[in-house]
Image (tube, rainbow, N blue to C red):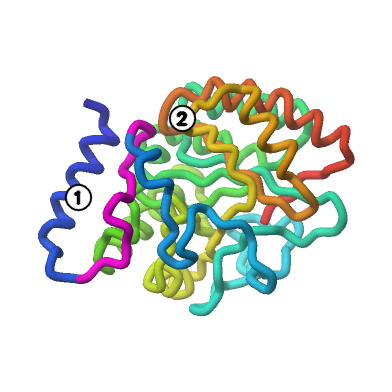
Amino acid sequence: MTRRVLLTAGGLTLFSLWAAEPADHDATAPRWPDAHRAAAGRADPLTAGHRQAHRPGAARPHLTGTAPDQPHLAVARRSEMPLRTIHDGPKAIALTIDDGPDPVYTPQVLALLARYRVTATFSMIGIEAQAHPAVAREVAAAGHLIVNHTWTHLNLAWLPPAMVTEQMSRATDAIHAATGRVPRLFRAPYGAWSPFVLSQCARTSMAPLGWSVDPRDWSRPGVTAIVTNIMRNTHTGSIILEHDGGGNRSQTVAALKIVIPRLLAAGYHFRTP
């Protein structure tokens, strides 16, 4: 049994102690890791749909080149919905990499990004940053944006406020300890946003980050399927979701080797949210 499964089981045991509190979640929502994701389709309790694309008027103004520890990053407001597109001119897109850092796949992704001089956004799980601080530091040293992706990747819509707060704060502490950066963006696992999660983003000055292109690489559908999905659905402003942790990410790395040069050849340029 992996450490992540044990931690998730522990979190769910704690959750049972809070059973008297109502939860705004789909009872079929998945747990971590990959084998449990597919059953629920990653329900989003705020948008009543799976990983929905950006809706007009939901996005913040894009801040070009803003580092995660710079104080002038726009602060999330209670009413602000997750950012699902960026706004940095024609052909601007963002590549986001979730669930690391991973000692096997993150260095491969970093080498590929360096080869094409692409800056990406890494949504880090706190316990992984704590376990692999050197890899987390490599990400930071390469100039990529770092996002809080919770402590153990639990579905926050299942959890009471105290546990949501802990998941977010422990991840921030671990990322800061590993990289020296305090994340100013937050991505909810499975896209499971709730009113409390958004309000906690506002209280901790982390803007909520979503996505608009999801090739479901975590399910390992095949390199061709990942590439086809990204190339078909990417447009100006797209935020692409990929993964460097949480399982075997060889398909993701292979797909990125194809799509990054194709997107660059098509005139796209990569920015951070």
- Between tags 1 and 2, which lies in front? 1
* Magenta segment main secondary structure: loop
Q: Inspect this view and state whether residue 134 appears.
A: no
Q: Earlier in the sequence, mark 1 or mark 2?
A: 1
Asked whether residue 200 is in view, the answer is: yes
Q: Residues within 10 Å of mark 1 (few under 14, many from 20)?
A: some
Q: Is residue 232 left or right of residue 151?
A: right
Instruction: Give the residue drawn at x 60%, y 53%.
Output: 211
Looking at the image, which residue is at 59% across and 43% down?
A: 214
Residue that mark 2 sits on: 102
- Write the residue at 72% across / 64% down: 62
Q: Amino acid at mark 1?
A: Leu
The residue under label 1 is 12
Residue 80 pos. (x, y %): 55, 74
User: Up-down: is 192 above or below 93?
Assistant: below
Do the CB atoms of the residues marked 1 and 2 lie less than 8 Å apart? Answer: no
Q: How many marks?
A: 2
Look at the image and give the residue range highlighted in magenta.
22-35
Q: Position of residue 249 (x, y in %)?
A: 51, 25
